[in-house]
Image (spheres, coloured by chain):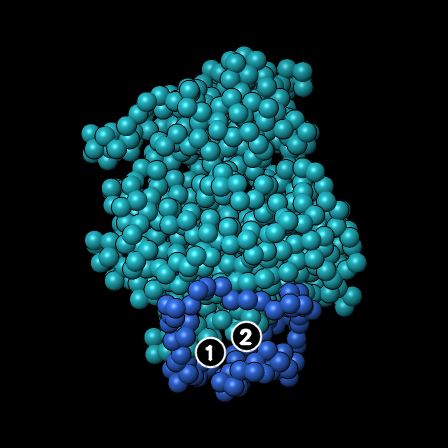
Chain colours: A cyan, B blue
Amino acid sequence: MNVLGISALYHDSAATLVSNGNIVAAAQEERFTRVKHDQRLPKHAITYCLQEANLKKEDIDIVVFYDNPLYTLDRYLKNMAMAGTDSQDVLERSFDSMFSDKLWIHKKVEQILGENLHRKFLVCEHHISHAASAFYPSPYDKAVILTLDGVGEWATTTIGVGEGEKITIKEEMRFPHSLGLLYSAFTYFCGFKVNSGDYKFMGLAPYGEPVYEELIRIKLLDIKEDGSFWMNMDYFDYQYGRAMTNDKFADLFGGPRREPESRITKREMDIAASAQKVVEDIILKMVRHAKDVYGQGIDNLVMAGGVALNCVANGKIKNSGIFENIWIQPAAGDAGGSLGCALYASYNYTSIRRKVCQPDSQKGSYLGPRFSSEDIRKYCTKNHYPYHQIGQENLYEAIAKELSGEKVIGLFHGRMEFGPRALGNRSIIADARSETMQVKLNQKVKFRESFRPFAPSVLREDVSEYFELDDESPYMLLVENVRKERRNESRLKDDLERYGYNMLDIVKQSRSDIPAVTHVDYSARIQTVNEETNPYYYKVISEFKKLTGCSVIVNTSFNVRGEPIVCTPKDAYECFMRTDMDVLVLEDCILYKKEQPEWIETDDWKSRYALD
Amino acid sequence: MGIDRNAREKELLKKWAESNHKNTGFSHDQNTASCFVKRGTGEKYIWEYGFESVSELRDLLEEQWEKDDNMEEILTPVLVAAIKNKPRTEIVGQEENAGQKKSDDMEKLPVYIYNF
């Protein structure tokens, strides 16, 4: 039974193929089209899924869309009624998408797959798609499920329970009251892009103080004991289809929104700190409520939805101990909805039985395309790119040697990751001990803002030697602190004042013995690496440990600012040549920058990737 | 600027929104203990989906809105808007090209508002 799950027409479109309940392939459309957060129907991702499974279009038994268009139509129209005489913008903004694409999703998919009377077309409730993506691949037979996002149809948050194949949603919050939209509103107001700047906003929070917390609680929200909340819509504009916030919101925070790309001031830092604190409080209240009301005798919490990518909040949930175990879908945003709806259809529309696997059924989230060593050699030879093919016995040591020499390495091997995080297969890696690496990577490799932190990859067995964590974090979804004995004393508040809130001066300071992955508040977004899940990556870090005694390296996604993570050897080579990366590793081939032919750009490639 | 072929339906939707203005989603009862809405037991979360004709879509929407009196008056403009914008599968090649052009226009997400 081959089930194809599709997410599309909002943001981060993707396709997932599930065969007899087994996740065979999953990929985001953006990786193929090179358009970040591509929302169009994922025809390239569908083609890839079929190729990976060696299937033809007619072999697909069921197609599932991750959202119910009729419910979305209902929300669209009733949102207009809420807006009344001010409904023109919301009407125009979504009319075409609603009536040309979403309602006709079955015909749109037919245009890609061809007509097939034997194929079923299903639609799945949006938050069930998220809930299923969190529960079914998790290692639990029974769990409480929390989904949090901007909005899907009407729901913005749901609490449910999963057991075996069954998922039941117990309660939900509804549009326009939404934690995801609230967070997006602050992201927008602080000059970052909605739909893509939330990570930056979260990274900015440690620089600030939560001086606006009370203001947010009093003026913008009415937070209930169970974590549910009402938003005072007088301060927002998204319900009218315009921008996220309005003039009244600006007045509340002392002036207009920060212009994108302009200098970040103390105000934005403090707003970020305040919003993050409020969001964490809300989520913790919801988790506690979910445990009290629905989690008696259940020790497991699973999460999905875009807000579940807030790894700082995730760390707080873990440390709260409300649930003994927590598992978060690595493709927590809409892309993961394709996986969730395909699994939900498999277990609830067909008679396939779910098998719970350890450590989970997500396969490390390595669900995308792979390229063989032969493919790589052919690509390099055809293009006259000099490379060194290294035998397996020497490959990892060779990479580790370059790392220890403070070289920046593009690492490309195995199957591409599904979800927003690079987990070692499409990663840029570097020496975490280097005091200059964070600035170098931000400015000369990623071309992004100086304040943004980098994440560590650490051998699973050594994680507690470096961080205040002694557990798995294979998907880089938990933030914990660097251990106290590894930290250098720093006084962030004093330093910010001394340097006039110039964050570049702050990040230049060494905050621990692994400074390149230590954020200004000593936190780190950790990826633990297991030999079983990713032997190649594990061996690279192990060899680095043999050489240096350190089992932590920098892991950042293999792309530049605004570019989707690389998918093919061609994407990887182009990114390598356009940046200050020193070495490119393509499977078992090593390419040195100094040996490569002169790179001549035929167009303004940076303009192709709009700043995120 | 060409003529908007959906102008009539948009106008009717707008009029309906104005005459059915209900601020219920934005209003607030401070005394309520929770903003969570309970979901029923045994609810369905997945459905077979598809329609070809006006009457098939009408059946689906009438079922959805059977307890929603004020949706009845918007039903016809919604049906017309949907049918007017039906993808033309009988000329797949041309439709795909046209669809691609429109898709190219929408490929970049708005930076000022969450896409919902």
Question: Which numbered dot is residue B85?
Answer: 2
* Chain name for mark 1: B
Image vertical order of residue A352 relative to residue A78, above or below: above
* Horizontal side of residue A500 vs A97, given as left or right: left
Q: Position of residue A77 (x, y in %)?
A: 47, 75
Question: Which numbered dot is residue B6?
Answer: 1
* Quadrant for the N terminus of chain A in the image: bottom right
Image vertical order of residue A525 relative to residue B35, above or below: above
Q: Secondary structure at mark 1?
A: loop
Let me know if marks 2 and 1 both belong to one chain.
yes
Between disc 2 and disc 1, whose residue precedes?
Answer: 1
Local packing at callout 1 (Cα closer than 10 Å; few below 14, some 14-19, many 20+) is some
Q: Secondary structure at mark 2?
A: loop
Front position in the image: A111 or A12: A12
In contact (CB < 8 Å): disc 2 and disc 1: yes
Q: Position of residue A67 (x, y in %)?
A: 58, 63
Residue B105 shows in this picture: no
Front position in the image: A133 or A313: A313
Q: Amino acid at mark 1?
A: Asn
Q: Amino acid at mark 2?
A: Asn
